[in-house]
């Protein structure tokens, strides 16, 4: 066997993630695909569907003139995807900031911000549902009960009873606040909106993620809350113990000079949060931290660094979290190489509820282009599935990979991925029998 072949086999053996697969089919140079979110549905091993929703921007020069919400699906662990992207909502002119989740019955839900340009139209959060794995979708149901002000940053989670919990940003009265609504009938109707943050604040808040804590059904919102005249963003957690009717005062997670992009997952005994920011001791460094709340002790642990970066890199975006059935926490980070200013996606995980993290592992194959804003899901066996938005200077595209052994075992043909999923974590709510968001502010008004 030649030395070259031995080296190749060695590379394949140690590689953690399968070759990257492009999942969108948008090749028009006046379009840019971006801002993806992912969920994994219930099903038999090696047959669990992977759902991805993303934004498809129509552009004229540097300007967006319309944004549409698109859907993709794989039923073979990510090896192959739908032959064409499925349109969920045509923008009028804007439908953006999508998020996606599934419930334990296999229903799929997508929320997004919609902007109606008709006379008397407004801006609102919208939800659609599919009962057949994404083949057909319900008519859009309006989530919020007010259309005043700019809107964006939608996210969705399902609780153990199948109730839906949605959060979004809205700009009533000149300041952004976080609002939530709940549906108890599979997304057909929604409760009156509830303001999560203190609406008497002299500054504003934006939310980054929602989650439902299993066992307690507490509704959780991770947020960026601004202080000092909008000059100091901080990472906050808001919690509702009555299924979204009221929220406790927010808890500041970070000890940074400024922080943001908070995300959150939870099991019965722990709430794990992540965020990025500038440490007070070194304001030139941007790092990511996690912090864990211990339910039984009713106390917060010490903030823990998620990674130590060498001088050639700096961390910008803490990224989303996912919780697998074996209790591990997974995250996909966005990291910039300061030598060439390129952004790449990296992976790390924690086996002790966010107290410490594994070494960084590069996810993206092509490090010559920018890869931004990943989403991540994890299955009960502890394997991770990652999607992200990649921009090569001309096209914005959607990409996928997994570290499932089945996804690495065979050479891709298209290229593709073979991944055997072991049920079961529904995105944003851990349930035995199903598997497990977005950082764009709408400018559609």
Image (cartoon, rainbow, N blue to C red):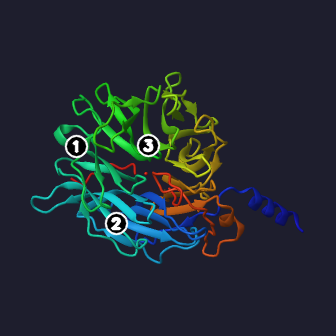
Q: Secondary structure at mark 1?
A: loop
Q: CA distance from mark 2 to mark 3?
A: 25 Å
Return the disc, 3 or 1, that comes first in the chain's sequence.
1
Which residue: 68% across, 55% down? 16
Provide the residue designation for mark 1: 171
Above or below, comparing residue 247 to residue 429 in the picture = above
Above or below, comparing residue 40 to residue 324 in the picture = below
Q: CA distance from mark 1 to mark 2?
A: 26 Å
Dots 1 and 2: beta carbons under 8 Å? no
Q: Is 42 placed left or right of 416 in the picture?
A: left
Provide the residue designation for mark 2: 129
Nearer to us: label 1 or label 2: 2
Of all residues, the one furthest to the top in this rendering is 281
Q: Quadrant of the N terminus?
A: bottom right
Q: Secondary structure at mark 2?
A: strand
Return the disc, 1 or 2, that comes first in the chain's sequence.
2
């Amino acid at each position: 066997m030649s030395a070259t072949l031995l080296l190749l086999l060695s590379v394949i053996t140690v590689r953690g993630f399968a070759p990257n697969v492009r999942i969108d089919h948008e090749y028009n140079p006046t379009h840019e695909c971006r801002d993806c979110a992912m969920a994994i549905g219930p099903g038999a091993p090696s047959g669990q569907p992977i759902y991805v929703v993303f934004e498809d921007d129509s552009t004229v020069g540097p300007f967006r003139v319309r944004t549409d919400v698109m859907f993709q699906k794989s039923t073979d662990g990510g090896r192959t995807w739908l032959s064409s992207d499925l349109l969920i909502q045509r923008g009028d002119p804007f439908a953006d900031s999508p998020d996606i989740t599934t419930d334990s019955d296999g229903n799929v839900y997508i929320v997004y911000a919609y902007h109606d340009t008709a006379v008397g139209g407004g801006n609102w959060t919208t939800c659609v549902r599919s009962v057949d794995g994404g083949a057909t979708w319900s008519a859009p149901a309006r989530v919020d009960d007010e259309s005043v002000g700019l809107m964006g940053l939608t996210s969705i989670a399902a609780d153990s009873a199948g109730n839906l919990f949605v959060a979004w940003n809205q700009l009533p009265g000149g300041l952004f606040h976080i609002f939530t609504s709940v549906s108890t009938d599979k997304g057909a109707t929604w409760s009156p909106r509830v303001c999560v943050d203190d609406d008497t604040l002299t500054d504003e808040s934006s939310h980054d993620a929602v989650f439902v804590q299993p066992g307690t059904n507490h509704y959780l919102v991770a947020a960026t809350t601004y202080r000092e005249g909008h000059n100091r963003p901080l990472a906050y957690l808001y919690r509702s113990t009555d299924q979204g009717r009221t929220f406790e005062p927010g808890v500041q997670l970070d000890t940074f000079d400024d922080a943001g992009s908070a995300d959150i997952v939870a099991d019965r005994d722990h709430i794990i949060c992540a965020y990025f920011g500038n440490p007070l001791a070194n304001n030139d460094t941007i790092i990511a931290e996690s912090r864990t709340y211990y339910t039984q002790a009713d106390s917060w642990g010490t903030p823990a660094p998620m990674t130590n970066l060498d001088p050639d890199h700096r961390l910008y975006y803490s990224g989303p979290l996912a919780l697998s059935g074996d209790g591990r926490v997974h995250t996909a980070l966005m990291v910039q190489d300061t030598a060439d200013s390129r952004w790449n996606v990296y992976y790390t995980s924690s086996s002790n509820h966010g107290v410490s993290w594994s070494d960084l592992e590069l996810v993206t194959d092509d490090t010559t282009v920018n890869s931004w804003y990943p989403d991540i899901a994890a299955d009960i066996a502890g394997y991770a599935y990652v999607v992200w938005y990649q921009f090569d200077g001309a096209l914005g595209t959607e990409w996928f990979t997994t570290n499932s052994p089945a996804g690495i075992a065979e050479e891709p043909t298209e290229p593709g991925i073979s991944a055997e999923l072991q049920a079961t974590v529904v995105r944003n709510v851990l349930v035995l029998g199903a598997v497990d968001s977005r950082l764009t502010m709408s400018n559609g008004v």
